[in-house]
Image: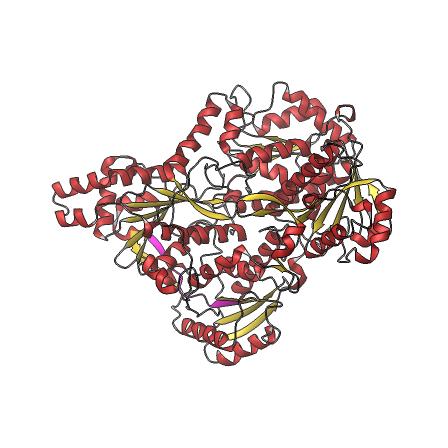
Amino acid sequence: MGDHDVSPNPKGSFRKFLEQLSGAGKAIGVLTSGGDAQGMNAAVRAVVRMGIYVGAKVYFIYEGYQGMVDGGSNIVEADWESVSSILQVGGTIIGSARCKDFRSREGRLKAAHNLLQLGITNLCVIGGDGSLTGANIFRKEWSGLLEELAREGKINTEEVQKHGYLNVVGMVGSIDNDFCGTDMTIGTDSALHRIIEVVDAIMTTAQSHQRTFVLEVMGRHCGYLALVSALACGADWVFLPESPPEEGWQENMCIKLSENRARKKRLNIIIVAEGAIDTQNKAITSEQIKELVVTQLGYDTRVTILGHVQRGGTPSAFDRILASRMGVEAVVALLQATPETPACVVSLSGNQAVRLPLMECVQMTQEVQKAMDERRFKDAVQLRGRSFENNLNTYKRLAIKLPDSQIRKSNCNVGIVNVGAPAAGMNAAVRAAVRVGIADGHKVFAVYDGFEGFAKGQVKEIGWADVGGWTGQGGSILGTKRTLPGKYLEDIAAQMHTHGINALLIIGGFEAYLGLLELSAAREKHKEFCVPMVMVPATVSNNVPGSDFSIGADTALNTITDTCDRIKQSASGTKRRVFIIETMGGYCGYLANMGALAAGADAAYIFEEPFDIRDLQSNVEHLTEKMKTTIQRGLVLREGHVQRRAGWERAAMCFRNESCSENYTTDFIYQLYSEEGKGVFDCRKNVLGHMQQGGAPSPFDRNFGTKISARAMQWISTKLKEPAGRGKRFVSDDSVCVLGISKRNLLFQPVAELKEETDFVHRIPKEQWWLKLRPLMKILAKYKASFEVSDAGQLEPMQPRGPEEPATI
C-alpha cells in the first residue's frame, strides 16, 4: 500500500475516517501558554495540519492567553505552509506569555468575544497545569459569557445558539514532567538531553582534577529531571523536593562520597533539584552542599547551575514524535467532543496515546504539592505515580551499596552476556544488572565477547565498583558478537558447570532471541541450561518479538534526526532539493518510519508496507507539485510583532529502510527522483550507516536500559528464591523469557509463546505497534491516508486499572 493509497482496510476506510472526523465548518484555536518547552512547535504543526486535513479552519493565537484577550492581529488563520520548517525548532513560534488579564472574568469576556468573531469554539491549549486550569474555567463560563455579550449587544441570540459550547483539549508542554496522568510531558526528554550533555562534558573535566561537581537542575516543585538525570549518569547523591534526605544526611553524604573516593573513583557528581528541601521544608541549595563538602572533606568542589539551557535547543526525536502524536489525537478529540464531554488532556501511557479528564489530572497534580507542604513525603512520591516511585527505588539500589556484612548471601551465581550488534545503552543495562544482582546477594559473572567468548571461557566475576561510570559509555564494554550458541553448546554447558552459573541474563537483539531459543531447546541434552534465563532487548533495529521498544533504538533515532536537521540546513539558500536517506534496521522499518515522522519527511519506504513503481511515481509527482508552489521565505509585519512566514521547506526528505526492497534500491530511487524532478528540484542521497549504532546513549536509553535490566535481575532473584530454587532444574517455559514493554505493561513472555509471533525469515515480529503511526506521517506530509481513531469521547479513568506492572518509560 503506497503513500497515495486510500483503499479500505478492515478497520475503516479513508471515507469512513472523513465521515467520523469531518471538521467542515469548525474552527480550532491553538495556543501555547506558560513556560516554553521543546516540542511545542511539533505539537502546533500537528494540530494545524490535522485540522486542515479534516476540513477545519485553524487559527494561531499568538502570545498565549494574552493574545486571546487582546485579539486583533494576535489571532491569525494558519495554512499548511505556516508550520513548515518548525518541527526542529525549539521553543514556540506562536509565542507564550503569562497573562493576568485572563484571570479576571472581564478578561475572559474579551477573549470570548474575540474568538466568536472568528467562530472559534474549539481550543487546543499546550501548556502546564495552570494554563489548562484556566482553559477549563473558560469552558465552564462559556455559555454565561455569551449571554453577557448578548445583553451588551455585542453578539446576537443566533450566535449564542450557534456557538453554545466550547470544546477544550489540553496537551502538557512542560520540561519538569510535573503533571499527573501522563508518563512524559512534551519537552521533558529534550531537557534531559541538555542535562546529560552537560553531565557528560563535566565528567571529563572532573576526572582530570579529582573534583566534586554539584549540578543544579530545574524542578521547583518536581524532582523528575533531577532523579532521572541522576539515574542516567550514576550520580553519587540526588536531592529532590518529593523525597528529602533523612535527618543527619550531611554526615551520610560525606561518608558516601569518601567511600567512593576510596574505591578509586576520581570524581563525585551531586544533582540538586532547584526546589530541593529537607524534612522541615527548608531549602537545600547547591551552595550549601558545596560548603559542606569543602569544609567536611576538603574536596575541590564546583557548582554548575544549568538554568534556562534546559529549556533551549532543538527537540529530541522522542519529543517530536510524542508532540506529533498528541497534536493529531487532540484534533481527533476536539472533533469527537459533544457539549457533555468534559475538558480532556491527551496523555501518554506506556506507548499509548490516551485521553484523561483534565481536572482530575490537575487536582492530583495539586495534591502532590499539598502533600509536600504538609510534609507527607511518602504520599507525595506515591501521588507522582508508580514510574517516579520505581525510578527512586532503582536509584537508591544502584547508588548505595550496603556493607557486605549486611547483604544476605544467596549462594547463587548469575551470568550476564551481550549478544548481537552493539547498541547504545547496553552498558547501562549491564551496570544495573550487576549492582542489583550483588545487592540481592548473588555473585555476578561477566561473559566477554558473546556466546563465542562464553564457549572459550572468557568469564570473570564482576564487582560493584567495576561498573562505575558505565551508564554514559556507548557500544558494549563486555564485547558482543553475532555468533549463535548452537555450535558451542557443549563448551557453553561446560563453562556454566565450571563457574556454577545458576541463572543467565542475555542483553541483545534478534541474535540474543535466537540464542535463547537454542539454549532452551538444548535443555534436554544439557542440564546446565535448566536455569532461569531472561533476555533484555537491545538493538537499534527494534525488531525483537515481545517488546515494543529496544535499548539503543532511541539513540539511533536521535542520530538520524540530528543528521537530517543538518542535511536540511545544507539546502537552505540553495535551489530546491530532495534527499533520499537510507537507514539501518534490516527488514524492520522502525527507524525509517519513526525517523521520517521525527524529521518531517515526505515518504518512508519500508518492507512491512510493500510499494511499487506507481507509488514511487505518485511520491515524485506529489513532491514536484509541492516544490512548484513554494512560497519565498520572508517576514510579514503585524502590529508590534514579526510574524514568521515559513513557506515550503526548500529541502524534502524520503526515507528508505535498507532492506525494504530487493530491486527498488536507494540508488534506483535516487536516480528516479533525479530524472523526474529535473527543472523543479535536484536530488541527493545519504546512507547513514553505522553512525546509527555509535555515540553516547540518549537519556531515554540510559534510563530504559537501567530500569528494564534491574527488573530482569529482580525476576532472576525471585525465581532463584522459589522452593528449591538453587540446584533445582528449571524446565518450564516460564523460566525462559523475554522482558519487554507491551502497550502499557512490562511483561515477561516465555520465548516458547513468542515463536508463534515471529517472522524468522525476515527477523521481525509479525505484528508491530508502530505501523499504526504510518498514516500520521503521511497525513502530516499532505497525503491521504487511512487512520484508525480512538472511540468517540472515551476518557480513561485516572486511577490505576489493575495489578499489571505499568510500562512507564
Q: Is residue 561 left or right of residue 164?
A: right
Task: Please state the horizontal and vertical placement of residue 717, each as a whole percent of the image.
Answer: 71, 35
Q: Quadrant of residue 755?
A: bottom right
> Residue placed at 77% from the left, 36% from the top?
465
Up-down relation of residue 673 to residue 181 (above or below): below
Range of the magenta residues?
638-654
Which of the 4 quarters of the picture holds residue 581? bottom right
Q: Quadrant of residue 365?
A: top left
The answer to whether residue 548 is seen in the rendering is yes
Q: Count all numbered tags in the image, as a single digit.
A: 0
The answer to which of 374 and 190 lies nearer the viewer is: 374
Q: Is residue 748 above or below residue 19?
A: above
Residue at the spot x=58%, y=54% of the render?
Answer: 558
Nearest the eye: 194 or 120? 120
| Vertical side of 436 occupied by 600: above or below | below
Magenta-colored stretch includes residue 642: yes
